Amino acid sequence: MGLGLQGCETTALAPMGAAPGRLSLEPDERRLWLRAEEEQRRLDRSGLLYDDPRLNEYVNSVADRLLAPEVRANGFSLTIRVIKNPTLNAFALPNGVIYVHTGILARIENEAQLATLLGHELTHATHRHAVKRFRDLQNKAALAATFGVLGLPFGLIGALASALGQLGTIASVYGYSQENEAEADKEGLTLMVNAGYDPREAPKLFTHMKEWLEESKVKEPFFFGTHPRLQERVESYQQLLSGPFKDVESRQGRTVRTDEYLSVVQPVILDNAVLDLQAGRFLAARKELQKFSTLSPTDARPHYYLGESYRRENDSKERDQAVPAYERAIALDQSYADPYRGLGTLYYQTGKKREARVAFERYLALAPDAADRAYIERYLQELSEGGGES
Amino acid sequence: MKRMLIGLLLLLTAGCAPYSRVSGNATISELGIEAALPDGWYRANRVTDALLITKDGFPLQFIRIERVEHDKELQFTKRKFSPGMPPHDVAELEADNLRSATGISNFELLDNRPVIIGGLQGFRLDFQWRTSDGLRVKRTHYGFMKDKWVYRIVYHAAARHYFDRDLPAFTAILGSFKLTKT
């Protein structure tokens, strides 16, 4: 395993910020941090990071508001990075680097919900859950058996599976003990409340993700992508709101910040829909495209991708809906070439030669330098050789 | 009698060998194809659903020819081809599947263009990525759809030294590629 943890070490460790002065790591924890830095480098070089400076600045500013002054005084710093992947996932490395998937950002509804998620993940780091988890497993002599093989079952995360190291896998797939997860819920909620956010958004986040998974009929391998784990979070936050946070809940003037969140995250919603489309998750893609379209009603792109989702699904009933979606995209932006290619391909596939030719010709007229020009020219040649107008 | 036994033993041993040298025109009836194979390459005999050959070992380079039924789920995206799918859609599906493969990073699709293979409309995809060991590899993937089959003719090699060196062997295979039946 290479982590060199010693046998039967205590899993009782004080959280960061409990004592003044620079952070003091235990020897095995220091090795874990070095490992985390290695994994971080691998992820950062993997080509999987989502490159949007405005989004990065925004999510880091939300996280920064959550970090308690006493933890900051220990010299602990926090960094958020976004990964291009449509699954519901976020995980923290022990050194304070938190990775959030575009899939989860696209489904979060407001800044308070983002703060809930980041607060939960931040607590895993500040409360040293990774080293506790490793010590606990080693004490049970189960470490090798549990994490010896990375056998994630879902192809969608394939490229990510090789970039995720052992720590990332534990954090994002297996999660921590129930006790540690409950602690992350409670302490995370405290952080978001201290930062002025409305705690009522916390259970809503997980309820919303659970409903989304059910409606989209997708199965995911990650902690936040599994129904029982989400249900646990919903119940845990509901208990906190009816117990220790009861008074906070009723206070007025708490921040939710829906518009601010959506204005920054809006491009992610469309990009993530395209990722879902590439992965063949058509229902999930459509839900996101509809959400994007509501936010940006005059944008033609979601209608084009909706058309693509219907055309590519290989279902004749769904395919019938492709034409109106492409036509809507064209109505919104007549200089937009892609819907013409979609229409051309659809007509080509269904034997409507004349319509296919008109659409392909229009596509090439609008996008003379299109990367797939050679394909389209070949189809046009075939359509003109074939004769037999439909 | 002794000679016959030795002969039989040699025959059995040869049949069980994991690799055998290839050379000249070959008809691979289980794939319904014919192609001229390069001298000095070895075929993996235990791979029965594809023609898989290498010169220096599979991590360094290989050529793989196979066909899959269109309604079989792709390995990584779990998507399927559909009958009558135009070549650019087939190419896109293949590229998306590879993009989602395990054990790769820094995936790049370098080129995607239409080609004619054995008289049929198909596509050519060029990729590069890094393996989990950090090796930079390049792949050229030719493909086309014929009836219920999607054919793949793939050349994969370490980007440094091997890819360019052995590309002519792949080009020769491609030039001689023919379908014998579908």
Image (tube, coloured by chain):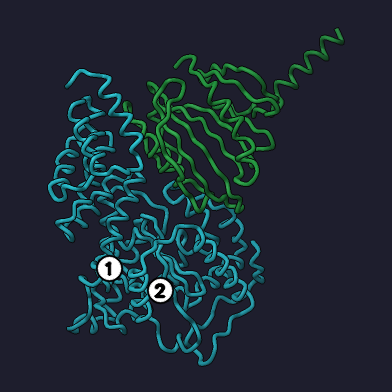
Chain colours: A cyan, B green
Q: Quadrant of the N terminus of chain A?
A: bottom right
10 Å neighbourhood of mark 1: few (<14), some, or many (≥20)? Answer: some
Write down the chain letter for disc 2. A
Q: Could you tell me which residue is drawn at 43 percent across and 47 percent down? A: A154
Q: Residue furthest right?
A: B2
Closer to the camera in the image, B135 or B10: B135
Closer to the camera in the image, A213 or A274: A274
Helix, strand, or loop for circle 2? helix
Write down the chain letter for disc 1. A
Q: Earlier in the sequence, mark 2 or mark 1?
A: 2
Q: Is residue A381 above or below residue A298?
A: above
Q: Quadrant of residue A211?
A: bottom left
Whether residue A172 can be seen here: yes
Q: Quadrant of the C terminus of chain A?
A: top left
Q: Position of residue A245 (x, y in %)?
A: 28, 81
Q: Could you tell me which residue is drawn at 55 percent across and 69 percent down? A: A36
10 Å neighbourhood of mark 2: few (<14), some, or many (≥20)? Answer: many
Q: Is residue A382 above or below residue B97?
A: above
Residue A264: assigned label: 1
Q: Position of B86 compared to A256: left or right?
A: right
Helix, strand, or loop for circle 1? helix
Which residue in the protein does label 2 denote? Answer: A184
Q: Is residue B94 above or below residue A141?
A: above
Name the amino acid, label 1. Val
Q: Quadrant of residue B69?
A: top left
Q: Is residue A95 above or below residue B171?
A: below
